[in-house]
């Protein structure tokens, strides 16, 4: 199958690119001009210049999802697009909507012109539905609780408005863990410093999935010839923030001191981290988006539909996923040391 992956140089996109290339698909990727390709190291990347002498390659197209005139050629002849390009956080609501929602609209409009009837798999987020503790299914109403979730919910609405002209599928992953992830790096760095985070109040259940299991789920959706407008939650394990931190400490063999943060303190720390990021230009692991998600009453979902309809069978446990993350962080210098004492 000829597939285009947007945002292919990101954490999820790079895993999906490898997955689909290794299974034999003809993979194209759309990258912003000058975007880092570090997470794609080892793949046979080649520009779209018509040269096929290099054998089987991942064809690179440069363009920006918010500028339709820059990426249309990448859609010529594709059977499916997996849309991952977007912003995970921003200091303004308008920027999130411009990229995550209006970027989806621009892509859909260009697909109708260049690849009518093709399949679009939009990678949305559990945050589009909003917090939940009771494992809702895909029929639950959308009640996003932050700007990011609102922008993803709007992207879903836009994509579904094209369901009569494109074959639309929407994936809602839970919290994603695995090699190359920056979002959960914060917890590893805390443990590296001998700290373990917990937040006041009752335990908050949190569904998780390994990035390679998610890649398989997205691949199943891209290859599915099902009705337009289907939505699937993609997840595997359920944990809590405290249990996740304890497992990280165990994997790192570090003795840790639990730091109990009241909700108010975490919010202040996150706001300060966002300010420091804006001033310095250096993206810090802690931010308002992460704090809002950690303070929600829970993030859970049911994957019964994905199992029954897609045959989705995630195999990588959270413990294994965290171990894979740790090895990757050490190998790439994202953690300073691999030494530590016994766990507390």
Image (cartoon, grey):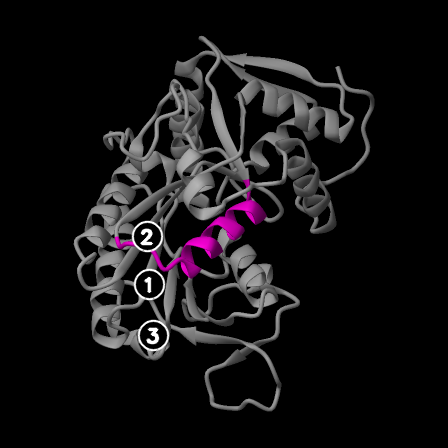
Q: Nearer the viewer, residue 109 or 148?
A: 109
Question: Residue at image x 47%, y 65%?
Answer: 35
Q: Which residue is mark 2?
A: 169
Q: Nearer the viewer, residue 74 or 307?
A: 307
The C terminus sits in image quarter: top right
Judge whether 222 appears above or below 337 on screen. Answer: below
Give the extent of the magenta segment.
Answer: 210-228
The percent coordinates of residue 165 (x first, y second) are 19, 64
Secondary element at tag 2:
strand
Question: Residue at image x 53%, y 91%?
Answer: 51
Mark before the other along the chain sequence, 1 or 3: 3
Residue 119's disc number:
1
The percent coordinates of residue 266 (x first, y second) are 44, 20
Q: Nearer the viewer, residue 168 or 289?
A: 168
Q: CA distance from mark 3 to mark 2?
A: 17 Å
Question: Residue at image x 41%, y 29%?
Answer: 301
In this view, the residue farthest toward the top is: 201
Q: CA distance from mark 2 to mark 1?
A: 8 Å
């Amino acid at each position: 199958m000829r597939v285009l992956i947007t945002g292919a140089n990101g954490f999820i996109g790079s895993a999906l690119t490898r997955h689909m290339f290794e299974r034999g698909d003809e993979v194209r990727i759309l990258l912003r001009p000058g975007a880092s390709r570090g997470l794609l190291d080892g793949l046979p990347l080649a520009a779209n210049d018509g040269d096929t002498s290099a054998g089987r390659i991942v064809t690179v197209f440069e363009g920006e999802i918010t500028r339709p005139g820059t990426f249309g050629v990448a859609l010529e002849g594709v059977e499916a697009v997996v849309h991952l390009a977007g912003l995970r956080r921003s200091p303004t609501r308008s920027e999130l909507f411009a990229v995550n929602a209006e970027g989806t609209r621009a892509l859909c409009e260009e697909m109708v012109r260049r690849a009518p009837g093709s399949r679009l798999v939009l990678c949305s987020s559990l945050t589009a539905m909003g917090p939940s503790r009771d494992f809702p299914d895909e029929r639950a109403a959308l009640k996003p609780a932050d700007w990011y979730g609102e922008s993803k919910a709007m992207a879903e609405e836009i994509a579904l408005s094209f369901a009569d002209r494109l074959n639309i599928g929407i994936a809602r992953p839970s919290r994603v863990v695995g090699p190359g992830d920056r979002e959960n790096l914060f917890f590893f760095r805390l443990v590296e410093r001998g700290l373990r985070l917990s937040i006041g109040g009752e335990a908050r259940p949190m569904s998780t999935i390994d990035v390679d299991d998610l890649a398989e789920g997205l691949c199943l959706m891209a290859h599915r010839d099902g009705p337009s407008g289907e939505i699937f939650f993609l997840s595997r394990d359920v944990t809590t923030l405290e249990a996740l931190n304890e497992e990280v400490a165990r994997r790192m063999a570090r003795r840790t001191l639990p730091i109990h943060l009241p909700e108010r303190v975490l919010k202040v720390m996150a706001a300060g981290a966002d300010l420091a990021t804006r001033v310095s230009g250096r993206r810090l692991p802690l931010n308002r988006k992460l704090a809002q998600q950690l303070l929600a009453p829970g993030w859970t979902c049911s994957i019964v539909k994905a199992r029954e309809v897609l045959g989705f069978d995630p195999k990588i446990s959270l413990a294994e996923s965290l171990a894979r993350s740790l090895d990757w962080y050490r190998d790439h210098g994202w953690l300073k040391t691999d030494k530590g004492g016994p766990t507390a």
